[in-house]
Amino acid sequence: MEWETVIGLEIHVQLATKSKLFSGAATKFGALPNTQACAIDLGMPGVLPVLNKEAINLACKFGTAINAEINNNSVFARKNYFYPDLPKGYQISQFDIPIVGKGSMTIEMEDGISKTIGITRAHLEEDAGKSLHEDFHGRSGIDLNRAGIPLLEIVTEPDMRSAKEAVAFLKTLHSLVRYLDISDANMQEGSFRCDANVSIRPKGSDKFGTRAEIKNLNSFKFIEKAIHFEVSRQKQLLENDQVVVQETRLYDSDKNETRSMRGKEEANDYRYFPDPDLLPVNLEKGFLDNIKNNMPELPWDRKARFMKEFNLNNDDAAILVNNKLLANYFDEVILKVQNHTKNTSNLYKLATNWILGDLLGALNKNNLDITKSPITTQDLADLIVKIDDNTISGKIAKSVFESLWEKEGSVESIIEKKGLTQITDDGPIIEIIDKIIANNPEQVADYKSGKDKLFGFFVGQVMKESKGKANPAKVNQLLKDKLSK
């Protein structure tokens, strides 16, 4: 039987607030265990939660970006369940009336095909603490630093039909929350993590199959692998006349398999009811208008601008825009170079090629992100201008780039100190060409008899004699003239 995969996602995004959702405790990652948990986070008797207004602001910012319905009146509820690292015995979340309602986001696949994924809701809730199992000799430690950190849980419609679509959605969402500055979305630190609801059904059927939830995935690679395994597992069960059980499963990246964690709860299992300690949230019109009027440039808008203004192709624009900091770097370089020549299209092309080629290659090789680049936007802008005005050739520029990386000075000082200025005058180049022709009479005769491929030999000899400083275009032009006589 041919099967169709159905995937819906629940993404937990830790919001970039300085304090927690209902307390004044700090949210900085990496603090010593239990040093950022106050009486409210510990669930002590008699304490009362106080809502963090900034969390509301960040949630509404996200809702505005995805053109979602934003509820002017939303309610916090108690979600009752036991976790060892959930001190109160319940989680404050939202159920019937979330802050953000229905919206959508468009993803683009590798083949260029776009697809719109429905977003059911995005609600605010507090994070749980963390159980630590290593180095406790058969016991577990509880760290409550994370307890109470504001989460935006984004729930999609079951609109994705492959692991690749799910990953494309998550990467688009990951980029968006960073553009909005609502989260650092650091997957290694757990501030962007995902639960995947996976089911299969006979192709052509409109009835959903029984889903399994894969919990706490925090790597694009592992998300894709986990979904592939789960689809394969469910196919095997159904094709052997067995049933898929609705449950929550964990993905083991070492064994590349999912395994059962617990039965999947339904909403009624959590016994939701409005939290009596928190008033409903009422948003004023001016609050939402202020958010709309101060929205940053979104990744898809920036991509469209890069393609229109700088004539970038779809793939290059997508790579640049996917990383907000890299896109910022590109914008700064363009701003610094575009006043130096009328031939801006050449500068845009040079900037794109150097950033996506040499710079990204060097950063990846040295395991650095763009914020740690030894080469500043001014360095790269100066280098591009020197290539564009023929002060140096592209080949020499690579040598200058290496010197910039090693912090040997500015572009100007490196060129001057190493004597790298390109030879563009005809006279010195003709002298070198005459010398090469005089020293290679056999090759000259062979070339004139029809062995055109020898032209590359002469170009190479001239560039070698000039130590790479002769202008390649001039060399080609003058060589052709000389060898045609």
Image (cartoon, rainbow, N blue to C red):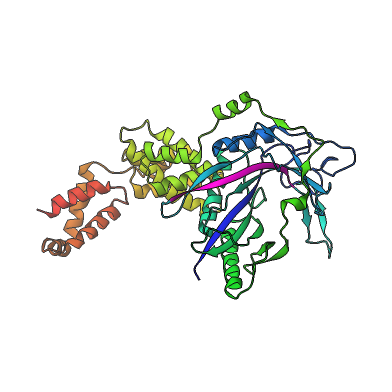
Looking at the rendering, the stretch of residues picked out in magenta corresponds to 114-127
Give residue 355's position: percent from left, percent from top.
44, 46
Can you say whether 44 is above or below 252 in the image?
above
Instruction: Point out the residue furthest to the top here.
Output: 286
Residue 46 occupies which quadrant of the picture? top right
Instruction: Point out the residue furthest to the left here.
Output: 485
Q: Residue at x 57, y 53 (%)?
A: 158
Whether residue 92 is visible: yes
In reply to whether residue 88 is colored magenta, the answer given is no
Give residue 251's position: percent from left, percent from top.
65, 63
Q: Residue at x 36, y 48 (%)?
A: 396
Total labels drawn: 0
Residue 264 occupies which quadrant of the picture? bottom right
Give residue 38's position: percent from left, percent from top.
83, 40
Q: Residue at x 35, y 41 (%)?
A: 311
Q: Is residue 167 left or right of residue 87?
A: left
Q: Magenta region's main secondary structure?
A: strand
Instruction: Point out the residue furthest to the right here.
Output: 45
The one nearer the camera, 440 or 292, is 292
Q: Residue at x 50, y 43 (%)?
A: 326
Whether residue 402 is visible: no
Give residue 217's position: percent from left, percent from top.
64, 56
The one nearer the camera, 211 or 91, is 211
